[in-house]
Amino acid sequence: MRCLIGGLPYTRKDGTKKATRSAKYRCSGKAHQKVKCSGQTTYSPTRIEGVVLEEIYAYLDQLKTVDLTSQIEKLKKQNMSEETKALRKYKKEIDKANSDLTGLKNEVIKVINGESSFDRDMLSEMINDKQKEISELNEKIEQLEQQLESKKVEHAELEALQKHVPVWREVFKKASIEQKKMMLSTIIKSIDVYKDRIELNLNLHIREFLDTMDCDKKNIPTNWVDSGKVLSHNSLATL
């Protein structure tokens, strides 16, 4: 469905011609006879947008009453414990592997001096295997550290969301048309319009939601990758 601006021309009393300009939503599929449905071809923006905004306001009002604090603490306990244990395990393994590698490298001098029970080929293969093991452990550690950092950011995002959801409506009302579009794009996934109802699918992308509000995010690290945390909600409203 697209928003179109147009109108019919009319003649003023002084004889000049003028075209009226009004916006409307048009179902392109039905207008071009590409789909069959019982709904209208065009809808008034006031009718559609009013219902959509009321549903969004109602959803955000629900978020204000949700105890996000307990959810945040639950996430901290459940989501981070496994990664922390695995990280400790891999760090112990890499310490031992580095110690083994140092011992193997020290053996090289003995091989050169003919004082080692290892031959050069065997020792070279053992060193290569140990270096490969260390490289793989480093990759696992790096991945886990990134996951843990992402979880910390996710918690900070939820805390920021809890703080700023109550003022979203006021910020939205004062925003420019372009900023309103950006703010809505961080919440709305899709809107399905039928003859007698609207189905609204919401996906609140927390980081983008906060960014478009230009809110204070001082508790969220600046050098992090977006956690991608999304809150989903579906609603049905009658027209």
Image (tube, rainbow, N blue to C red):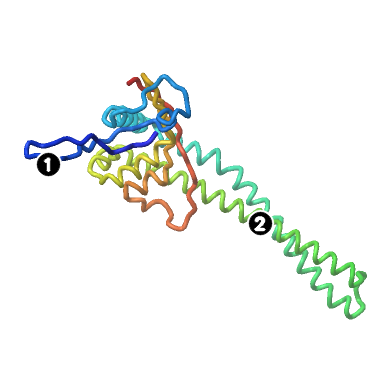
* Mark found first going from the N terminus, 1 or 2: 1
The span from disc 1 to disc 2 (Cα, nearest Å) is 74 Å
Residue 96 position, x and y percent, is 73, 59
Q: Quadrant of residue 57?
A: top left
Relative placement, left or right, of 176 versus 162 is: left
Q: Nearer the viewer, residue 169 or 36?
A: 36
| Left or right of residue 75: residue 113 | right
Helix, strand or loop at label 2? It is: helix
- Type of amino acid at the residue the image marks with label 1: Thr
Q: Disc 1 vs disc 2: which is toward the camera?
A: 1
Q: Position of residue 121 (x, y in %)?
A: 89, 70
In the image, 200 versus 102, the foreground residue is 200
Label disc, if present, on residue 16 of the rendered structure: 1
Q: Residue at x 89, y 80 (%)?
A: 113
* In the depicted structure, whether residue 58 falls above or below residue 162: above
Q: Amino acid at mark 2?
A: Glu
Indicate which disc residue 139 carries: 2
Q: From the viewer's perspective, is residue 238 above or below residue 227?
A: above
Which numbered marker is on residue 82? none
Quarter of the view holding residue 182: top left
Q: Which residue is at 32% across, 50% downward?
A: 214
Q: Residue furthest front?
A: 15
Quadrant of the rendering where the C terminus is positioned? top left
Secondary structure type for disc 1: loop
Question: The N terminus lies in which quarter of the figure?
Answer: top left
Give the residue at x 33% y 38%: 165
Image coords of residue 140 (percent x, y): 66, 53
Q: Position of residue 24 (x, y in %)?
A: 30, 33
